[in-house]
Structure formats: C-alpha cells, structure tokens
Amino acid sequence: MSKAHGKELNVLTSYRLNDFKKKIAFTLAEVLITLGIIGIVAAMTIPTLSQKIGDIQNKAIWKKKYSEIVQAYTAVKQDNIRLCVNDSEDYNIAAKCRYVGDGLYEERTTMSPQFVNAMVKHFKVIDTCGFPQYGESRYCNNYLDKWNGLCGGKAAYSFYGSLISGTFKNLPTGQSYCNNAELNGLSTGWDLSKKAILLQDGSVIYFGGSAAPMISVDVNGFQKGPNVVGRDMFAIMLNENWIRPIGADGTFNKNVNGETCECGKEYGVESAQGFLGSTDLLNGTQLSGACCSYKYLTEK
C-alpha cells in the first residue's frame, strides 16, 4: 500500500469515527425527555416499593412481638395469676371475662388488673396510660402525648384505619368521643383503652377488650403510621386456656365470617368499635384487616 493510499484510509477512518460519535450523542431535549420518563416511572414505583418494604418490616416486628406476648402470657399463667377473677364485685381487685370458643360465657368485661400488670412487667416500658383500676393516673382517651393512638378529648387524629378505608379519618369539628358510627376506620375504644404501654423500641401494646379479652399491638407506634389494622396494627384474643391471634380458630364467628377469616380489604367491615362490627363477639363481623394478625404469623 502506498503512502498516499494509507493517508486516504486514515482520513476516511477519521470521518467514520466522527460520524459514529455524532450518531451516539444525545441532544439536550432527548436527555430531558429521558430524565422526565425516569422520574415518572420512579414516582410510580418507589411509593409502592417503599410500602412493600415497610409491610415486610412490620410483619417481622409483629412476629417478634407476638412471640414476646405469648412468652409473657405463659410466664404469668405459670405464676398462677388468673386472667379472670370471678369471686369479687370489686373491680379494683377483680374483673370478669367473657370466654370465647368452648368456654363459658359470662359478663362482658376484660382482663383482671392483676393479670395485666403482671404481663406488663415482662416488657421494657417507658410510658403508660389507662384506667385507675390498672394503676394509672391518666386515661388513655385523654392522654395527648400522641403515642397511644386513642381518640377522645382533643386527639381528633387518633384513629386506626381498616384495610378497606386505608387510613383513619379525622373526627368532625367539635367531636370528642370515639363512638361515632358515621366515621370511617377503626374507632379505638373498648378494645384498646384499659391500659396501654409504650415500649423502648417504639411499639405500643394495648390491653383491653369488651366482647373478649384482647391484646393489640401497634408495631411501629402511632406517630409513624400507616396506623391501619392488618398493616402495622395487629390483635390477639386470649382467655384462661389459650392465647391466639385474631383469625385463628375461636377468635371469630364462622357463621358470619366464613370457615376462614380472610386477610384482605375485600373481607370484613370498614368500621368498627374495636375489631368487630358488632359489640357482640358471637354475632360480629371482623374489621377488615383484623385476621391478617393470624395470616402473617403462619405464612412462609
């Protein structure tokens, strides 16, 4: 090959490289359009991904809390401290229970103060509220430090929602009481207000119940949210003989809810006083999301 031909080849190659570089370059408009598309996709996917991650974390904490509560229940029972004390009319030293399942059906109240306070000793507690019968000087419904998630007084934001409603709904202006059937979401009243404890890890455990003794858990605290039953709020039913998550046998009415109490926003009622659509456990429909308490403990 002559020097002339070699020179021509080099020039041709240089032109082709420059032409290739021009072809792979992007204009400013193309870059902006691409960034815009990426931003739209991110805006659509990141919230969903974040919610899924949060739900996974909440489920893991729920499993841990359930295990801790069962261990405390077992220890208290081994100390021969009864959940129900039926030999006294003095509420300060006794509380009657309404059993569920194969047990007896008695007056509708809740766990004895002795039992609850014995349970509390097994947790790392940094703050409490509740009824005077449970050794408290501040009622949870009027305790406005914003960690307990109960409605009443000026705490017009303090609801837990159902899976159907998705979130809680604020009380109307001037409304200061929990029992309002027109409100969407869970009005946290009878099932939660006997005694509440704030733990060092930020979770809250509620001891209460009306139709039956209940222990409820907000795994990440009321301030963090989403404050929805079945996502970060779960519940346990118990009696003298067993302790079970809502959704397990004996914790719901099969004639009303079906053989299996399902976990999903298409199942159950949107709003309830506690975890039931009725104050009578034997007739009530579970609140949507309540039976997720059982499902998340059994799923792999």
Image (cartoon, rainbow, N blue to C red):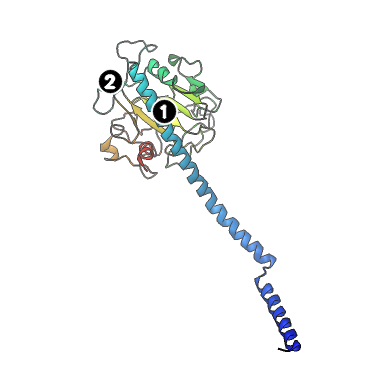
- 10 Å neighbourhood of mark 2: few (<14), some, or many (≥20)? few
Residue shown at 71%/84% (left/top)? 9
The mark tally for this picture is 2
Residue reaching furthest to the front = 1
Expressed as whole percent of the image width and height from the top left, the position of residue 114 reads 39, 15
Locate residue 27, reporting x and y percent: 68, 68
- Secondary element type, mark 1: helix
| Mark 2 and mark 1 residues within 8 Å of each other at the beta carbon | no
Foreground tag (2 vs 1): 1
In the image: residue 83, left or right of residue 103: right
**Left or right side of 239 for 33:** right
Q: Which mark is residue 200?
A: none
Instruction: Give the residue type that dot 2 points to.
Output: Glu
Depth check, front residue: 18 or 126: 18
Residue 126 or residue 179, whichever sits in front:
126
Asked if residue 16 can be seen in this view, the reply is: yes
Residue 68, disc: 1
Q: At 42% across and 17% down in the image, what residue appears? A: 117
Q: Can residue 110 be seen from the camera position used here?
A: no
Image coordinates for residue 95, horizontal then vertical, percent: 35, 16
The foreground one among 153 and 74 is: 74
Task: Classify 10 Å Cα crowding around label 1: few (below 14), some (14-19), many (20 and above).
Answer: some
Considering the image in quadrants, where does the N terminus appear? bottom right
Which label's residue is closer to the chain start, 2 or 1?
Answer: 1
**245 lies above or below 27:** above
* Amino acid type assigned to the residue bearing label 1 in the image: Glu
Assign a secondary structure to mark 2: loop
Q: For this rendering, which residue is in front, 21 or 201? A: 21
How far across and how far down the image is residue 236, in percent?
37, 30
Residue receiving disc 2 = 106
Within the image, what quadrant is residue 267 found in?
A: top left
Q: Is residue 1 left or right of residue 102?
A: right
